[in-house]
Image (cartoon, rainbow, N blue to C red):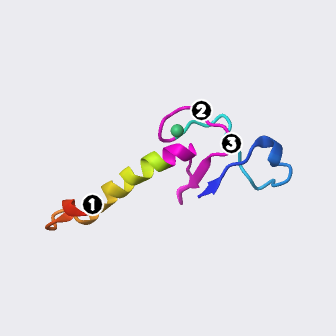
Amino acid sequence: MSLTRHMSELNENPFGLSAAGQRCFHCGEFLQDPAVMWSGNDGQTIYVHGPCVLDWMPRVLRDALELKYQGKPCWNQLP
Ligand SMILES: [Zn+2]
């Protein structure tokens, strides 16, 4: 995970990436920099608004915990 950079900053950091023109993986709206960027091992990259990460991440964790404790007693009593 890393933050994207505004195009004007890319001269200083040519290895940075801009999210301009990309759509947010969570809400679908167009992004501006800075945004959060994740690249998977399959080469795909997703871009997400910072506030969308905060909205999305607890849902992802809830689903992962449900999967981890699926079928085990008291799994739904986790905080
Ligand atoms: Zn978003």
Q: Where residue 53 appears, x then y in whole percent?
A: 50, 48
Decide: is 53 above or below 73: above
Q: Which mark is residue 50?
A: none
Alpha-carbon distance for marks 1 and 2? 31 Å
Residue plotted at (53% across, 44% down):
51
Return the residue at label 2: 30
Q: Where residue 74 appears, x then y in whole percent?
A: 16, 65
72 sits to left or right of 12:
left
Q: Nearer the viewer, residue 50 or 36?
A: 50
Mark 1: secondary structure: helix
Quadrant location, the C terminus: bottom left
Q: Residues within 10 Å of mark 1 (few under 14, many from 20)?
A: few
Residue plotted at (54% across, 60% down):
41
Q: Amino acid at mark 3?
A: Asp
Mark 3: secondary structure: loop
Instruction: Give the magenta-colored segment's residue range.
Output: 25-53
Residue plotted at (55% across, 50% down):
44
Q: Which mark is residue 33?
A: 3
Q: Is mark 3 within 8 Å of ligand 1?
A: no
Q: Is mark 1 within 8 Å of ligand 1?
A: no
Q: Which mark is residue 67?
A: 1
Residue plotted at (16% across, 67% down):
72
24 sits to left or right of 72:
right
Q: Is mark 2 within 8 Å of ligand 1?
A: no
- N-term mark: 3 or 1: 3
Q: Residues within 10 Å of mark 3 (few under 14, many from 20)?
A: some
Residue positioned most to the right: 11
Decide: is 20 above or below 62: above
